[in-house]
Amino acid sequence: MIADTVRSLARLLLPGLLLIAVTVAPSPTFAQTQQVVVLTSFPKELFDAYKAGFERAHAGWRMEVVPKPTSAAITHVRERAARPDVDVFWASAVDAFIFLKSNNMLERYTLPADLRRGIPDQVAGFPVNDADGFFHGFAVSGYGIMWNRTYLTRYRLPAPKEWEDLIRPEYLGHLVISAPSRSGTTHLTVETILQGYGWQRGWELLLRMGGSMGAITERSFGVPEAVIAGQYGIGIVIDFFGLSAIASGQPVDFVYPSVTSIVPANVAIIRNAPNPEGARRFINYLLSDDGQRLLFRPEIARLPVRTALYREAPRGMPNPFTMKAGVQFNADLSASRYQVTNRMFDQIITFRHAELRRAWEAIYRAERAVEAARAAGRDMTETERMLTQARASASYVHVSERMAAEVSGVMERDAAYRSAKEREWGEVARASYVRAAQLAAAAEEAARRR
Amino acid sequence: MNVTAARTGGPSPLEVELRDLHRRFGDTAAVRDLTLTIGPGEFFTFLGPSGCGKTTTLRMIAGLLLPDAGEILFDGRPVTTTPPWRRDIGMVFQNYALWPHMTVFENVGFGLVERRVPRDELRRRVDDALRLVGLEGLEHRLPSQLSGGQQQRVALARAIVVRPRLLLLDEPLSNLDARLRVQMRAELVTLQRHLGITTIYVTHDQEEALMLSTRIAVLHQGRLVQLGTPRDLYEHPADVFVADFLGGANFLPGTVRGRTGDALVVALDAGNGVATAELHASASRHTEFEAGDRVTVCVRPEALELVPDRGPAGPNLLRGRLRLVNYLGAVMSSEVELPEGRVLRVQVVRPPTDMPLVEGAPVALRVAPEAVLLLRPPASP
Amino acid sequence: MRIGIPGQAVAPAPPGVGWRAVIDPGHAVLGLLLLAILAVFVVWPIAAVLGAALVEPDGGVTLAHLARFFENPLYIESLANSLRAGAWVVAIGTVLALPLAFLVARYDFRGRTLVTTLSTLPLVLPPFVGAIALTQVFGRAGTLTLLVQDLFGIHVNLMDGLRGVIVAQALHFFPFIFLTVAAALMNVDRSLEEMGQTMGAHGWRLLRRVIFPLVLPAYAAGALLTFVKAVDDIGTPFILNVKNMLGPQAYLRITTVGRDDVDGYVICVVMVAISIACVGASNWIVARREYATLQTGARASGLPTRLVGWGAIGALSLCVLVLGASLLPHLAVIVMSFSRVWSLTYLPSAYTLGHYAEIFLRAPRFIVNTLTYSIAAALLGVVIAAATAYLLQRGRVPGKAVLDAVAMMPIALPGVVIGVGFLRVFYPMTLPGTETSLASTGAIFVLAYMVRRLPYALRASHAALHQVHGTLEDAAAVAGAPRTRAFRRVVLPLILGGVTAGGVLIFITSAVEFSTTITLVSRIEQSPLSYAIYIYSQSPLGRGAAAALGVVAIVIVAVGTYLANRLSGRSRMAFTL
């Protein structure tokens, strides 16, 4: 009787169990040697193309992809350091690779000589590969400005060319950027501006842009997405977002400002990877001519590190190796104040965005009122002085470059100090912006007063 | 195990023996101390009000329920734990339990399929069974397309088609209307006599039980109260419960005064403790009583004779007033209120014509000593 | 649990009969098997989550971690946001659902059946798919936003942050309230109402004094369940990039901080507490409301009042307004799945079939995975649910209440919590003989989906089995069919429809499951459709393909719903839990 019950239950459960077996089967278990597992922060268009290409080039090999945002990807590697389940780390942000390298989670890999040939050591002054051979650049990217043509027409706005253009009053509320603390590429853009214009002027520029931002997105792709959909007009993005959108026929344009920097996106082998052979094959494929050509695909639109290929580049694709980057990007300087830059941006721009925007809105309104009053022949000197004060207050940089260098190290080590500093910066910023808004309001009132 | 026997040749009727059967549900004992033997070919009835344990007993005999203790034997072999499908029985359920997704033919043939009866034989036997219950031509109907009576017949055909050695019927007629019930009752008797199968019947309807059964077991609160032929039970009920449940009766408390010749003299209690009337009962039938014993006098309504309230007072004559008169043609039933306030039910086949039968009229009731039954009073007052 | 012979002195029993009268060995084996399955896949993961949050390393119970939750401003904000969003979803859902329910239940007008059918359509659109589409309708550059801006010069972005989550969820969940209230209204005995009228209650007073009290319990239960589902749904916040809510925070802690992060588990515990409180309250209300439906005597099933002329037009236009709003996401998803360029225009300016080519030809894996996981989950779930329901209704075993409680437990467990529990329990285990973690095989999805939706299947099986009187099985046993044959020949054919309907419910809800999926998924090769929608939506040009997958999801759910309703022979209500 018991046997009956068990037997018939087993018979009923069988189809489900069989299907479970099917779902287990395609997992790597049964073909341990013939695969490579790639952990990546890249979007689907990119890793899909490489998956197809790699599997075509290496018959019998399979490429599995674990897609995660960079921060989650680092956690993934860290948690499984004792028994890694991925072979390759594949992402943009150099900082992530430096972190993994310094925590001993990457495997050194020396490229075969024939692959090494044809890849320059530097792009616009930035090293393409890790000097110790732990990670390798496979594509380079520059940063620039992307805008939606329909949007600019609809709101009758001119197209920008340079970072300074973005502080025009008419752009108020039409810009979009992502927070550098969330997006490695935006951090590089911010650092480029800071290095290109200098610490003080760079922050003033960023604060004025910040006042015009309609939104500060959490994710880097949120910027191109918003521009493509026409939610905002002008976005600060890494080049391939702009180039791929143009290639897919969206009504957008992209420009590299003269102050730009060009940095590589990287690939590395995880230490104790379960499939080291697969990992090597993947990197070799990525850097081969075939692999590099995939970057030219319109939906990917990235710039290869293999310079010879630029002869085949599609129209409109720039060659970064011949470009004169306005900034010789100093990676060591960037790394040394990484914490300060990101936390400062968060404290004085991202988290104080509302106050900052109100301040600049008031200033622009006051400027128009003053303009009108001056056109009416009135003497505006006094009011002008108030406005200058307002502008200074709304772009007040509390932390000097020297101070940043000093606190950076301590901030990384000491959480209490860090949060104390953050609170201080945030408070000062808020107070300055509120004062700026009051001054501007007073100036406007004075200008309108008869 | 008896599948082979069932298939080949006619089944020999089964003897069923229950020994000390116990079954409780939670805290209530549904059946206790049940011991009895049902002879081969008997039409045996478990009778009792709902909750008396009769259906529980039947389900234990069927193997659908295991007893907590005790044994069930078929032809002397213990089958207590044998599952129902190996007991070789047929059963009709109170709600018929026809399988709604099967046609009449499939319903009836189900048990034969389980017994791996060849197709040809299966068809023949199903046809036979359907003919026996008068349902030819309805093979392809679904149960939902049948009337209640037809469904009942399908259930019966399904039970007998496997030629069981024991047929169990669980209140099979209770869901039918009155006219159909009477008709089916007669058919059931004929069928059972024709097949000769040992049959166990469960009902709460004393009329059915009396008419159908060779013997009846009256159950009350899980206990066997009395076992006997219908006539035994009616004429010699073991206690007030049986007497009341079978046919109904008037009950009067009293005390045995003594013996007068062949008569046992009982004084009926009056409301205030003073004896108002005396009844003589047959002393030879009631040897167990002595002077001074408390008794309950039991008189069937039809044993009382309505006489004019004239003549002298005497034994077995009770005076009272007519309280209610229901003239039903062949019989007249009425109630007579005794002086101390008790009410007796009276059923008269031919109402006397020499007295006014109006409510409130003084009347006398006469009862023959043979018709006076003395019972032990119920244990608790 | 009492096994054995009653204490009284009785005649010596044959050995073994005593306990077998109470316990059927076959049932006991089946019950233990089911309990074992449920213990591993339901109790263990949840216990693991609770343990991680409430137990110290030395084994003592602690509330310290939980206390820290209430000191962290981010968590407090997340909790507040989740509760606020849930409350708003219920509020907006009520405003949309109640008038519609009253109209449909009380009045007859042209198009009434159409309205009833259409009103269930939002349920076939997973809320996170709706969220993608709604940004194209109500977002900053959405069709209606632009229309309003061009007509009136006002710019309103409905899809901004938490507001967007609320809009998307409200449009998805309002049918839950509509269906429960409409059903309750139709159940209200008209004679009660007439009684009210004869006693002098008219119009508003009648509504307030007679009808509201009768319908209120159903409404409250529906609203509570809607609230739970809204709090449980993390797909919509994710697609709209709202992170400051409980579900997303739990997920983010576990994935970015790590599986050993206590805070993640503490958030899970808070979510479970909210969920249990609401489900408990809802069950309590439903149990108490029996009085409303108990008086079933001869129901005066008077036809609804017929509306004609202006009344009919008014009713219909209200319906069109509400349903129009709730069907917008469907339209938008479909349009989006064909759009190539849709930038600051009312409708796309260039169309393509490329998104469908992408999901069917280039990456068909997601659909295949979804079908495989969901069908496997449905098959397993159906068998387990049917066996459980059978034991609960017919079984001769002790401990049924435990089995019932465990099997129904997932209904009060948020998807993220199930996912997190599965990760914690199964991640450290490997497939025998390999290095592959159990949690990174496809089977983990099957099991998680099965567990998550088991209560649906269990209810369906219960209802189906309830229709099959126990004597049908007895009759088969007596007729010579051993128990398993009796089950196969009699019980199974009779419950098959209802049980299959339960399976279809598992299938469709699993096919669009997001919360558990995103927690468990690692390799893109194993990803089902719902996670693929998320992945596509994470690249600036991927929303078209995401929408195309969304259309596939809609089709799967719509077909499944139709089948489930056909099979169960009941209308719509199969959906309302």
Image (tube, coloured by chain):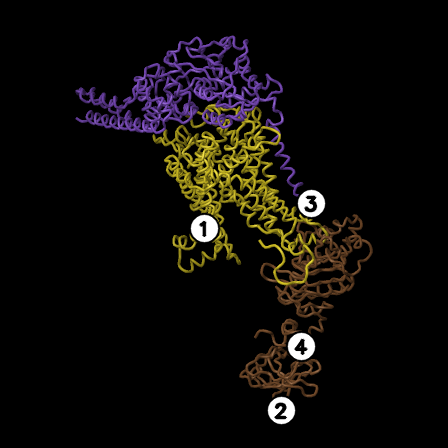
Chain colours: A purple, B brown, C yellow
The alpha-carbon separation of the residues under discs 3 and 2 comes to 83 Å
Disc 2 residue type (three-letter) = Pro
Of tags 4 and 1, which is closer to the observer? 1
Q: Is residue A110 above or below residue A74?
A: above
Q: Are marks 3 and 2 on the same chain?
A: no
Residue A3, numbered circle:
3
Q: In this figure, which residue is indicated by the disc labeled 1?
A: C217
Q: Are marks 3 and 1 on the same chain?
A: no
Horizontal side, residue B248 vs residue C283: left or right = right
Horizontal side, residue A80 vs residue C490: left or right = left
- Which of B374/C53 is in front? C53
Disc 4 residue type (three-letter) = Ala
Residue B330, numbered circle:
4
The alpha-carbon separation of the residues under discs 3 and 1 comes to 47 Å
Q: Is residue A248 above or below residue B170?
A: above
Residue B312, numbered circle:
2
For this orientation, the residue located farthest to the front is: C58
Of tags 2 and 4, which is closer to the observer? 2
Q: Are marks 2 and 4 in contact (CB under 8 Å)?
A: no
Disc 3 residue type (three-letter) = Ala
Q: Give the chain letter at badge 2.
A: B
Local secondary structure at mark 4: loop
Q: Are marks 3 and 2 in contact (CB under 8 Å)?
A: no
Q: Is residue C481 above or below residue C247?
A: below
Tell me what residue is drawn at x 62 percent, y 18 percent. Answer: A59
Q: Where's residue C80, x and y in %? A: 38, 39
Tell me what residue is drawn at x 54 percent, y 29 percent. Answer: C527
Q: Where's residue C223, x and y in %? A: 44, 45
Local secondary structure at mark 1: helix
